[in-house]
């Protein structure tokens, strides 16, 4: 199993909060924007990935099988 992560990068405003709480999952460009529209991460990174999803104020990160609350 992998963690399927989608980011609506067009809506990213560069808070960098996703990477602050989940540095092993979310990578930002030099200006602090998340430019990775889709990636699959190891299952061991699921909790970190979810934390990053929930930390995004714009709610542009979705993870398959996980609720964004
Ligand atoms: S927290 Fe959300 S808006 Fe901020 S850099 Fe990450 S994906 Fe973009």
Image (cartoon, grey):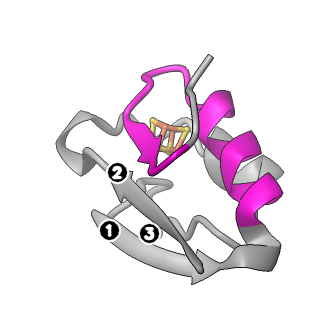
Q: Which secondary structure lies at badge 1? A: strand
The reply to whether callout 1 and callout 2 are in contact (CB within 8 Å) is: yes
Q: Residues within 10 Å of mark 3 (few under 14, many from 20)?
A: few
Q: Which residues are magenta?
A: 46-65
The N terminus sits in image quarter = bottom right
Q: Report the residue at 26% width, 49% height from top.
A: 9
Q: Report the residue at 79% width, 57% height from top.
A: 48
Q: Residues within 10 Å of mark 1 (few under 14, many from 20)?
A: some
Q: Is residue 31 visible?
A: yes
Q: Which residue is mark 2?
A: 7
Q: Is residue 36 visible?
A: no
| Nearest to N terminus: mark 1 or mark 2 | 2
Q: Report the residue at 18% width, 43% height from top.
A: 10
Q: Report the residue at 65% width, 69% height from top.
A: 25
**Percent coordinates x, y for residue 64 in the rendering:** 45, 51
Tell me the number on the disc at residue 29. Answer: 3
């Amino acid at each position: 199993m992998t963690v399927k992560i989608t980011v609506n990068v067009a809506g990213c405003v560069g808070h960098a909060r996703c990477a602050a709480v989940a540095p092993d999952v979310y990578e930002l460009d030099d200006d602090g924007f998340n430019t990775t529209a889709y990636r699959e991460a190891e299952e061991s990174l699921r909790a970190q990935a979810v934390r990053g999803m929930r930390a995004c104020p714009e709610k542009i990160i979705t993870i398959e099988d996980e609720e964004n609350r």
